[in-house]
Amino acid sequence: MTKNMTEGNPARLIFFFALPLVAGNMMQQLYAFVDTLIVGRFLGVNALAAVGCTGSLMFLTLGFIMGFCTGVTIYTGQRFGAGDRRGVRQSAAACILLGAAVALTLTAIVLPLTWTLLILMETPPEIIDGAYDFISIIFAGLVIFLLLYLQNCLVRALGDSKTPTILLAVTLAINVALEPVAILVLGWGIPGAALATVFSQGIGALLFWIYIRRRVPALHTRWSDWKPNTSVLMAHLRMGLPMAFQSSVIAIGAIIVQVALNNLGALPVAAYAATQKIDAVALMPMLSFGYAMAAYTAQNYGAQKYERIRMGVHACLKMSIAFAVGIGVLLIAFGTFFLELFVGADAAGAEEVIAYGHTYLIVTGSTYTILALLLVYRNVLQGLGQSVIPTIAGVMELIMRAVAAIFLCSSLGFLGACMAHPLAWIGAAIPVVIAYFWTERTLRKVPPKISA
């Protein structure tokens, strides 16, 4: 069911669009959460570290795909907001063609280099085999992940955030059911966790396809929509590639931090792995408010209702900052409890892992408000079709994470790694905030087109 976001109360529209996204994006993160939880509890700390140390490589590849899908479907949302039904169909076809090309190319590049990448990251010898087993299977399933996430983004671009949430919930349920069977019953160990994730994503992609064919006629393409159109393809690439590279640049920074962590030993790596899963789930509502602003902005920009964009930004900032403060306090106060879910209070090395992890949650939880600002402003710029400044922000994140890894980790140890995220958020927020207010000033000079 599509949703026109160019009419009605902006705060209400954004909130109720973001609400299902919160659940849906949290479920997306719960794939990794469930992998880590089951592996850590049933296969031990070294297995937890093996799966966890692949997180930055997963971010590099899956993040590239997610950024690309989000970027190209912004064009879809703009055409929908403008009432251009043929443009929506052409955009859907272009997204599929370009997405498949990106996923296949990425697979051909990273899959043969998996072992080399783990060596270059100085992965500890005791966990490198398990890390390879896990991440190579994930890499082999990149096309499946793209089919799932691209369809999710296309449906979301038309204003429907509820259905993707339901379909992702079903996909997660399949993953949760299959993973213990693969690990504990079939005895497949770490590879079983990866296979269960890829298989469940394949089922999810099929469910999205069935739903689109039955309930979303706006995305039903015709033969004429698949004819190569250079201007349409280039318009998608201008939005998709910068957002994809932006995600990859951020991921490279995460890899640099992971290399520094690997030099600290298996226990800090295990602690960081656990906290990354907790952190990722905690951040999902803020990310969801950002995604909501991208969709809201794209539709209203396509409809030339610029004043509504400004109204939406103010409403979204209030909601996102309020959540950032609340979740930060929660993680600082109860972080040790969440960490015990991964390693168990009585496991070998658990006390040290939990202590490391709580330090991380205190440092990041106290700076979530900065991230809330960054996500809202950056997604507004992306919804407007701007790609340069968000990419510059990604480069700033890379630089700041590299500073933390190279200089702070060597002098402060694990605490230095904990400071990587807050420093990156600060560095990225500066150009994004400046660009937003400059853009808002420019749009104010355009006569607004507002309806009730």
Image (cartoon, rainbow, N blue to C red):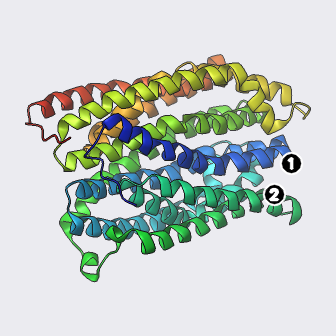
Locate the N terminus and report the quarter of the image it occupies. Answer: bottom left
Helix, strand or loop under label 2: helix
Whether residue 131 is visible here, answered yes or no, is yes
Of residues 201 and 44, which is closer to you in this image? Answer: 201
Q: Amino acid at mark 2?
A: Pro
Query: Earlier along the polypeptide chain: callout 1 or callout 2?
Result: 1
Which residue has dot 2 on it?
A: 180
The answer to whether marks 1 and 2 mark residues whose Cβ atoms lie closer than 8 Å is yes
Vertical order, 233 against 358 (above or below): below
Of residues 98 and 123, which is closer to you in this image? Answer: 98
Q: Position of residue 251 (x, y in %)?
A: 51, 42
Q: Position of residue 4 (x, y in %)?
A: 30, 52
**Mark 1 or 2, which is nearer the eye?**
2
Query: How far apart are the two marked residues, 1 and 2, measured between alpha carbons?
Result: 9 Å
Decide: few, some or many residues near mark 1? Use Cα within 10 Å; few <14, some 14-19, many ≥20. some
Whether residue 392 is visible here, answered yes or no, is no
Tell me the tag on residue 42. 1
Vertical order, 177 against 340 (above or below): below
In the figure, is residue 86 to the left or right of 12? Answer: left
- Tell me how many marks there are: 2
Q: Amino acid at mark 1?
A: Phe
Of residues 416 and 311, which is closer to you in this image? Answer: 311
Decide: few, some or many residues near mark 2? Use Cα within 10 Å; few <14, some 14-19, many ≥20. many
Q: Position of residue 333 (x, y in %)?
A: 69, 19
Helix, strand or loop under label 1: helix
